[in-house]
Image: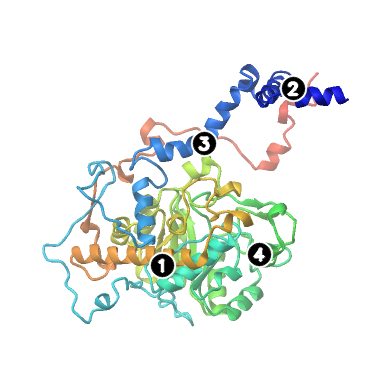
Amino acid sequence: MSDLLDFMSNIPWWGWVLIFLLLVAIRDIFFQKAHTISHNYPIVGHLRYWLESIGPEMRQYFVANNREELPFNRIERSWIYASAKKENNYEGFGTDRDIYEHQHIFINNAMMPFKINENHPNTIDKSFLPCAKVMGAYNKRKRPYRPKSVINVSAMSFGSLSAKAVESLNKGIKMADAYHNTGEGGLSPYHSHGGDVVFHFGTGYFGVRSKDGSFSMEKMIKLVEENPFIRAIEIKLSQGAKPGKGGVLPGAKITKEIAQIRGVEVGKDVLSPPNHKAFSNVPELLVFIEDIAEATGLPVGIKAAIGKLGEWEELANLMLKTGKGPDFITIDGGEGGTGAAPPSFADHVSLPWVYGFSDLYKLFKNKDLTERLVFIGSGKLGFPAKAAMAFAMGVDCINVAREAMLSIGCIQAQICHTNRCPSGVATQSKWLQNGIDPTLKSVRLAQYFQTFKKELIEITHAAGYEHPCQFKMTDIEMNVDDHNLSKELSRAYMYNKTPVPFINMQSLKDCVYLGGSNPNQI
């Protein structure tokens, strides 16, 4: 034994390196079967996987140009960062954007800009920009609400975002006179730092959930009574990232705190199904909205990504017939969002915001219902020019999610779904989120909102208007490559498929040929 120890002590450091590499090579060739590259090219094959893992970061910082990246390019991110830090967010020597690219926005300025006097609210506060409509006014809710800001924080749950991120957002929106949508994870202590709150819930009914997983009106009433800063209630029908798809919150992620907030059991998987239990059709949805509004006194709205319009037309017809209906509608774009989703959903299910909103707004406009509703847009609208376009199309407020995350430190690492967010914004890791200082980050969110509103007001004045609600469709021009030039597949390929006979899923499950089995086969 002593001879062995003496021999090992005489091995130089580079000898140990060679021994280690030899062991790795033996493992690659003879033991691991999962990776072909490392088997065929032992040791150096690992370099391929390492380069692949850091590829997105390398492209982001060294390869991609300023206007190339998605979902937010470097110029967009830099504008948000500079605005949030109150740094110079101007550009010099003209734009580097191709202004002839499709869907580029042009705002028609007036010959004589709108002039404000010395006593005008925007002379006193350059970022004063409340919503022009009042939620709940038409339906005579007991506690109608006019948002103080046209830009607000969109639905992002505690659980999806870290505690310190949610706290930063809530403190920031208080400074900016905006509102904070809770997301479907329930109202947490981190939403309760003085800012206005829109309570949002989906099919999981977190925060207002009974033991059997259904909606509890008693819990809703109690929640509103105990938290007077809740100004409105939003029912999520679907979201841009994954419309029509439910989700599972793994039991391993459900801490005692999250279980208490969401009204679920610690350590037990929780299902958020695609469908609501509280209603199953449009008439029942309308009754559900009115019941919540009557019980709480608050404006009640719905959020959805837009696809088929048949049920929306049914809702509009019921609103005409009954004189009732939602107080606001939040239209989410199919571009995806902070919610993790399969690429097949994020890339292909539901319309992009500009198409979805225009389709829905036209439907309600044709029935003279638009004045009853506050329309909220959500889908990469957190830039003044895009917001001007949205207001010209009929939006009354916008909600921002990823833009708000960027303002408090998100670096667009795009690993929100892994719990390894390097900026601490979208993770439950205590170590990673300790890098967030809510006192500082809340100020940055507020400064981003204030800068956004200031620039939107300046654009509005340049167009000859006082408030962006005055924008008309004719005030905005766009390089044409829009929804009206797209075709349905039947028109593009000149045929319709033959309908496939189908009864239900159970009949498929009961089929004797399922999986190739046939009890009558010899």
Question: Which of the image's four quarters has the C terminus?
Answer: top right
User: 288 or 453: nearer the eye?
Assistant: 453
Q: Which mark is residue 31?
A: 2
Separation of marks 4 and 3 at Cα, in angstroms:
36 Å
Q: CA distance from mark 2 to mark 3?
A: 26 Å
Sequence-earlier tag: 1 or 2: 2
Residue at (38, 61) in percent of width and height: 85
How much space separates mark 2 and mark 4, taking CA atoms? 45 Å
User: Is 240 situated above or below 154?
Assistant: above
Residue behind mark 1:
446
Task: Choose between 41 and 96: the one closer to the eye.
Answer: 41
- Which residue is found at the position 48% from the left and 51% from the top? 337
Residue annotated with mark 3: 54
Give yes or no for contact between labels 4 and 3 (Cβ–Cβ under 8 Å).
no
Residue type at mark 2? Phe
Eye-nearest disc, 4 or 3: 3
Q: Quadrant of the N terminus?
A: top right
Query: Which callout, 2 or 4, points at the residue further toward the start of the chain?
Result: 2
**Callout 2: few (<14), some (14-19), or many (20+) C-alpha neighbours within 10 Å?**
few
Q: Amino acid at mark 4?
A: Arg
Which residue is under mark 4?
262
Q: Earlier in the sequence, mark 4 or mark 3?
A: 3
Q: Position of residue 220 (x, y in %)?
A: 61, 73
